[in-house]
Image: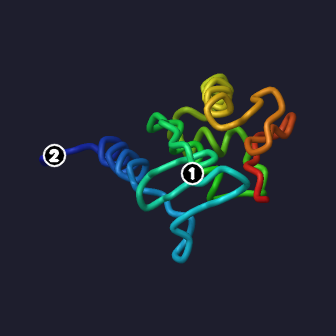
Amino acid sequence: MSKPFGVGELLARIRVALRHQVPAGGPGDPEFVVGDLRIDFARRHVAVAGVPVHLTPIEYRLLTTLARHAGRVMSQRQLLKDVWGPGQTEQAHYLRVYMGTLRRKLERDPARPRYLLTEPGVGYRLAAE
């Protein structure tokens, strides 16, 4: 970054760098497993019943954000902030579209999800068991 620069540009670059960090389940958790779903944080690999699943970067970020908070309900606003950034917290349609896509890729029956659960009026939750 060359000088002089604005504080807004610096903050935007910091947000991008933070978004591109590889999320981890925790210091001792290189993997998250629930049922047939397996997320390997170190290798950025997702599989269902041993079959690799290709995810876009946004889908992967959304799934790993939910996995870090597995079992807890995350509000739509918090997911939008964590995945898309603080400027997108009012764009709930993004979240609905990506959750539908993730369900089609990860669930046996997307209409009856086992892993990616909707909490009406609140947000979403990834099953912990």
Q: Position of residue 7 (x, y in %)?
A: 32, 47
Disc number lying in front (1 or 2): 1
Q: Is the residue 121 above or below the residue 75 in the image?
A: above
Question: Which comes before the other along the chain, label 1 or label 2?
Answer: 2
Q: Which residue is mark 2?
A: 4
In the picture, the quarter occupied by the C terminus is bottom right
Q: Which residue occupies 65% across, 22% down?
A: 93
Residue furthest toward the front?
50
Q: Position of residue 122 (x, y in %)?
A: 82, 40
Q: Which residue is mark 1?
A: 64
Secondary structure beneath disc 2?
loop
How many labels sit on residues? Answer: 2
Q: Position of residue 81 (x, y in %)?
A: 58, 42
Considering depth in this image, is 86 or 53 the residue closer to the camera?
A: 53
Task: Say what amino acid the circle numbered 1 marks.
Answer: Thr
User: Residue 9 is drawn in which quadrant?
Assistant: top left
